[in-house]
Image: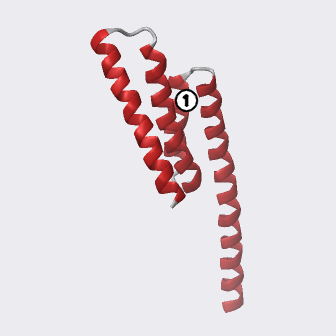
């Protein structure tokens, strides 16, 4: 009986391990989709892809770390892009937002390197 339980546990562990790879692959694909959207200036689509990734794949930790950095890049790029047409107080607000995300990205990359 103990052999059957051990066999069942071993099978269960193998299934869980395989599922993790699939989760990471799916999460990585969503991250790739977000990068593609950012490349072409589709900021809302890029944000939505990352937010969806975070909800669907909470255990894909390494991909989620990359997604956080990408989300900061999306916000920074969107602010810089919006600054082109902004004036006065709106330009100032967007400039402050862009600077904030630039600093945040630098800090996140430093923490990631540690």
Q: Crowdedness of circle 1 by 10 Å Cα count: few (<14), some, many (20+)?
A: many
* Residue 69 higher or lower than 37, as above or below: below
- Considering the image in quadrants, where does the N terminus appear? bottom right
The answer to whether one can see residue 66 in this image is yes
What is the x, y in percent for residue 4? 70, 85
SS at mark 1 in the image: helix
Q: Residue furthest left?
A: 89
What is the x, y in percent for residue 8? 68, 78
Depth order, front residue of 109/7: 109
Q: Residue at x 69, y 53 (%)?
A: 22
* Residue 99 higher or lower than 3, as above or below: above
Q: Quadrant of residue 93?
A: top left
Depth order, front residue of 41/2: 41
The answer to whether one can see residue 1 in this image is no
Q: Which residue is mark 1?
A: 46
What is the x, y in percent for residue 61? 54, 55
Q: Quadrant of residue 19?
A: bottom right
Q: Residue at x 41, y 28 (%)?
A: 98
Query: With 58 as the anchor, is 6 left or right in this view?
Result: right
Q: Residue at x 33, y 27 (%)?
A: 96
């Amino acid at each position: 009986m103990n052999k059957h339980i051990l066999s069942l546990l071993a099978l269960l562990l193998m299934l869980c391990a395989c599922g993790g790879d699939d989760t990471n692959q799916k999460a990585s694909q969503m991250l790739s989709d977000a990068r593609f959207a950012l490349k072409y200036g589709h900021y809302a689509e890029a944000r939505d892809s990352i937010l969806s990734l975070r909800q669907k794949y909470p255990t894909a930790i390494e991909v989620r770390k990359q997604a956080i950095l990408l989300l900061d890049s999306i916000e920074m790029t969107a602010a810089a892009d919006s600054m082109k047409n902004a004036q006065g107080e709106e330009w100032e607000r967007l400039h402050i937002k862009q600077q904030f995300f630039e600093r945040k990205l630098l800090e996140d990359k430093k923490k990631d390197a540690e």
